[in-house]
Amino acid sequence: MRRFFLNISFFIIIVFSVFIVLSKYHNIDKDSSQHPNIIRLNESINHQDLDILFIGNSYCYCAINPRVFEKAGLNVYNLGISTAGPMMYRYLLIDYLNQVSNWPSKIILSYSLVTFSSGSDNWSTYPIHHYLSKPISNAEIAIENGSIKLFFSLLYNSAKKGVSNLFLSKKESKKVDLFKGYINDEKELSQSDYEKSNHLYLNYRKDNFNEVKFNQLIELIELCENLGIQVEFVEIPSYLFDNFVNENYKEAYFNSKKKLVKLGVKLHEVSIPNEKKYYRNIDHMNSNGADLFSSRLIERINKGFTIK
Amino acid sequence: MLFNSIEFGIFLPIVFFFYWFIFSKRLKLRNVFLISVSYLFYGWWDWRFLSLIIISSIIDYNIGKLIEIFHGHRKRKLLLLLSVFSNLTILIYFKYANFFIENFAEAFQFLGMNFNVPSLNIILPVGISFYTFQTMSYTIDVYRNRLKAEKDWSSFFAFVGFFPQLVAGPIERAIHLLPQFNKIKKFNYSTARVGCQQALWGLFKKVAIADNAAIFVNQIFDNYQDFNGSTLVIGAVLFAFQIYGDFSGYSDMAIGISKVFGFRLNDNFKLPYFSRDIAEFWRRWHISLSSWFRDYVYIPLGGSQGSKNRTISNVFIIFLLSGFWHGANWTFIIWGGLNAIYFLPLLLLGVNRRNIDNFENILIPKLNDLILMFSTFCLTVFAWIFFRSESAESAFGFITGIFKVTLFSKPEIFPSSTLLLILFMIIIEWINRNKTTPLEFSEIKSRKPIRWSIYFLLVFLIFAYADSGQEFIYFRF
């Protein structure tokens, strides 16, 4: 019995020790990484005194072109992070505000069908929490999500990243062309691209609107109000993504927008023609779409906007 | 609670500690402890389910004793019928009531009559198909004088509710498992070590193979109209390994965990996808269920001893029942029927017991055997399409989708890492096919670092796929 107990304990301790040690090195690439999310996050603090800080997911970093805003005399930064949802929004916002002395005049958060899906706030695939100025531990993220399973997944991914950072040679990756967080891409969605990629979206057909995430967004609004920050939302169109979402989900999403408006929060509903020439893939805009979307958004914002 | 859950990870060591350090030397107290933790395990899904298992246990415990007391054939038979009737009533009500109501309604509507009966809001208790069959086998064996009725209620209740095999088998025979609850156990390091190896392997199959494959299988089967033929083939093949990884993985965990507690359960899977014909497949797949149907349905009906027509009808009866056991849906019945069609020619030609060896002393099977394995695998995959589909209509739609010119197109989904893991599993299970567990590498028995590296690799892979979190398929039965 003693031998069995010792062997099992020893094995478990070794496994966890290895994971924990390796996970300590998961973010040593913070300053050298060429990942757009990390670059975007690092560069954000170089932009202070903003008129608008945009926080959102990949729809955001594809749709909001700061060059268009500059031409209109607005200094903005695009802090879109892949899969970001309400929980990531909060961490990103707090991290940014803690690092800059002059806060933005306005925060605009992106709002879309995918924000409340099971795919948003994907900490496992996009562990942005490791790269904040004060990194958030995997345990804290897991506790916030109420999921111990998530902790083990995050621990594993951290360990994997640690291995990659420590032992694998860094490949020379293509330098990403970011302008104030925005990624320019002129590619237009083709039929073959659609056919190759549509299976990636099929799981959304069975997805449910996540009320917990919506409540987290409400809490974030309250936080901003307490901090004296003006917060608004912008609904970013997602071309063909609507086709992949079930009717119950759409209904719940539509109701959520009504609730938002009832709370007195401004939601900018900006549309662009639903044509593939404005989209790089099924749901992300290309540069044509971003330019058009950004200019129409400016028109809406300027109707009730006071520049500092 | 699931075996691959954090709750079970906390539950198991606590139970282990109390079992071996507090209760192991006192038989009745140990059994009562096992009953308590088993009911806690089972009630974790829904505490209301406990009433059914307790009722089933009370009925069959008392009927078993009464059967032994009464010597008259008629009274014994009546008691047996009462046991079978009560178990089947519970099973039929909770599992099949809505199926019968809906089908009667459709039949009446087809005949032009209106039949409006609301479907009942019945929750299917987890594992009901398993423990009802287990308790029925007890009373049948007592009736047949193959087994003495159990006098100690704690042994019997522990046998029925034993948590490692309660919710998804193996369906244990009382003659094999029940006596083990009447013996004091002594901790055996080798048995416990092998048990841990088996449980680890089972967990790997469940998480890294089954849950991983499920992501693609769900996508393909739920949206089969959107994929080309070759992708549908991949979906069907992946499902074959998903269900194998899921079910055999669970069985391995159940058997492995039982070994840690000093109990021996029967094997439930023996490399079924290496079968050279369907008869061999059914000797290797879900052995506890197929042998249950053989011993308690097929043989009492006459088996293959009667006329040819009788034999044919008996084969269809057990395969259709086996299909129906899996779920209240026509797709399971069609799946059972298909397997009967596959099996019948072998039985009628007398070649159903042709392949009974276990490939001893062979590194690679002969070409002839490989061809037979491949064709048997194709037949089972074809049948699995019905098993997995939501309806007969979607199953036929799926099959139609396969047999189009797009069958020869490049697959739209090709999960190479999943397929590599499946290949890894097949190789390991093949190499160690004659060992107690696939992780028993006797060649490196004395080299602990190498063995532990393999365990560590499996743990790493389990973590890598841990958050895909799928329910065990056979929990729905």
Image (cartoon, coloured by chain):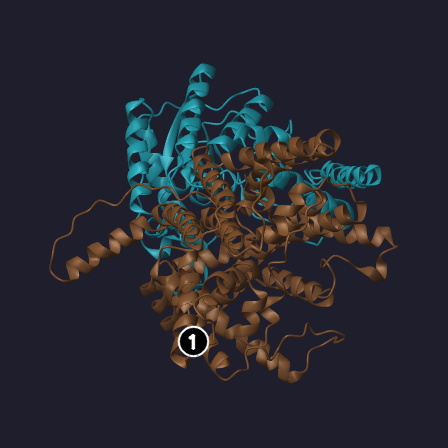
Q: Colour of chain A?
A: cyan
Q: B452 above or below A116?
A: below
Residue B403 percent location from the top left of the image: 40, 76
Left or right for B63, reference B313: right
Q: Quadrant of residue A16?
A: top right
Amino acid marked by disc 1: Thr
What residue is drawn where x is 34% and y is 46%? Answer: B93
Residue B227 visible in the current orientation = no
Q: Quadrant of the N terminus of chain B?
A: top right
Under circle 1, the secondary element is helix
Q: B102 above or below A261?
A: below
Q: Chain of mark 1?
A: B
Q: A307 above or below B268?
A: above
What residue is drawn where x is 53% and y is 82%? Answer: B350
Residue A133 visible in the current orientation = yes
The chain whose colour is brown is B
In front of the other: A233 or A292 = A233
